């Protein structure tokens, strides 16, 4: 497909951190009229994945030594 090299190029030019939405926006700026779902599908076919930002979710850790209040 003709879009695969363009998608790979946009991904590589942006330090391999852009996901599907940002790659699509970059391609629209370059003059390609392409849907987000198409970009995401082709990125998956090429094995490209953007970087996930933010901190990991951390939930409460169970204390195994604590006494259970609701035991029978």
Image: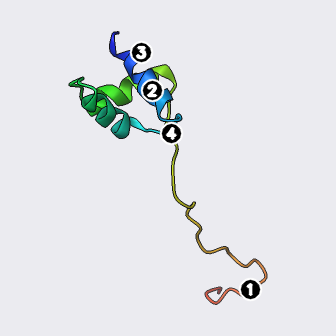
- Report the disc number at residue 25: none
Chain-order first, disc 1 or disc 4: 4
Label 4 to label 3, Cα distance in Å? 17 Å
Q: Which residue is mark 1?
A: 66
| Observer-nearest of 47 and 12 | 12
Regarding mark 3 in the picture, which secondary structure is present there?
Answer: helix
Quarter residue 10 falls in? top left
Q: Is residue 31 above or below residue 57?
A: above
Q: Position of residue 56 (x, y in %)?
A: 57, 60
In this picture, is 54 found above or below 15? Answer: below
User: Which residue is found at the position 68% from the left and 86% from the top?
Assistant: 68
- Residue sitting at x 24%, y 29%: 35
What's the distance in space between the residues labelled 1 and 3, CA to CA? 57 Å
Q: For mark 2, does the 10 Å Cα neighbourhood hold few (<14), some (14 to 19), or many (20 or more) residues?
A: few
- Percent x, y for residue 55? 56, 61
Image quadrant holding the N terminus, namely: top left
Q: For mark 4, what is the residue?
A: 17
Q: Is residue 21 above or below residue 38?
A: below
Q: Is the residue marked by circle 4 packed among few (<14), some (14-19), or many (20+) residues within 10 Å?
A: some
Q: Secondary structure at mark 4?
A: loop
Tell me, yes or no, whether the two marked residues, 1 and 3, touch with CB atoms within 8 Å.
Answer: no
Which residue in the structure is indicated by mark 3?
A: 5
Write down the residue under mark 2.
44
């Amino acid at each position: 497909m003709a879009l695969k090299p363009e998608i790979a190029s946009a991904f590589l030019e942006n330090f391999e951190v852009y996901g599907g939405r940002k790659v699509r926006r970059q391609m629209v700026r370059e003059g390609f009229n392409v849907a987000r779902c198409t970009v995401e599908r082709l990125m998956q076919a090429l094995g490209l994945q953007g970087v996930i930002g933010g901190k990991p979710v951390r939930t409460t850790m169970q204390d195994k030594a604590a006494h259970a209040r609701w035991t029978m």
